[in-house]
Amino acid sequence: MFFGLTSPFVEHCFIAEIGRTDDAFRARVELRPELTNSFGGAHGGLIATILDGTMTAAARYAAHPEGRDAVGTVDLSVSYIGQAKSLIDCTAKLTARRGRTLYMESSAWNEDGALIARATSTMRVLSSSK
């Protein structure tokens, strides 16, 4: 379960919930060989996945206090800054809302606490359980 939902791909990537606060979500992945690139570091697709997945979870709770509304990624922009060899920690939060459109941002750090990537996304609330 990742923030209350089952996602086969997130489970395949071994992404785990760390926690949630009023304005942020945190997730972590401990690297395994199948999640690395030819240099032995975190694969860029994995980094993008944890950034997007964590922003999606944050958007769900921004849309509904119990996280019941479905949201979808409309746009995702990732900037790769560094590399991770054993661990990725990620935090995501809402930066703005315009109706059913949510604007998100996230950052990821490696095992040494160094920033490895940042992302922004536009999310759309797909269903409303109001």
Image: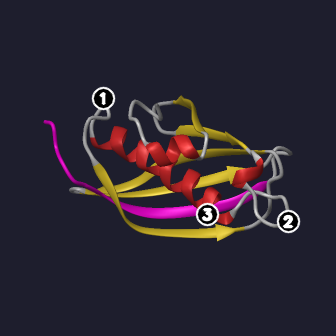
Determine contact: label 3, label 1, CB under 8 Å: no
Residue 92 location in percent, x, y? 53, 47
**Residue 52 placement, left or right of 59:** right
Other residues around mark 1 within 10 Å, as few (<14) / some (14–19) / many (≥20): few
Label 1 belongs to which residue?
Answer: 66
Name the amino acid, label 3: Gly
Label 2: element kind: loop
**Residue 113 placement, left or right of 100:** right
Residue 82: say if magenta. no
**Residue 103 placement, left or right of 126:** right
Identify the residue at image location x=67%, y=52%.
108
Name the amino acid, label 2: Phe
Residue 2 location in percent, x, y? 47, 35
Q: Closer to the observer: label 1 or label 2?
A: 2
Q: Earlier in the sequence, mark 3 or mark 1?
A: 3
Q: Earlier in the sequence, mark 2 or mark 3?
A: 2
Other residues around mark 2 within 10 Å, as few (<14) / some (14–19) / many (≥20): few
Label ID, residue 101: none
Label ID, residue 45: 3
Residue 18 location in percent, x, y? 60, 31
Identify the residue at image location x=35%, y=38%.
61
Label 2 belongs to which residue?
Answer: 39
Give the magenta part as a residue range: 115-130
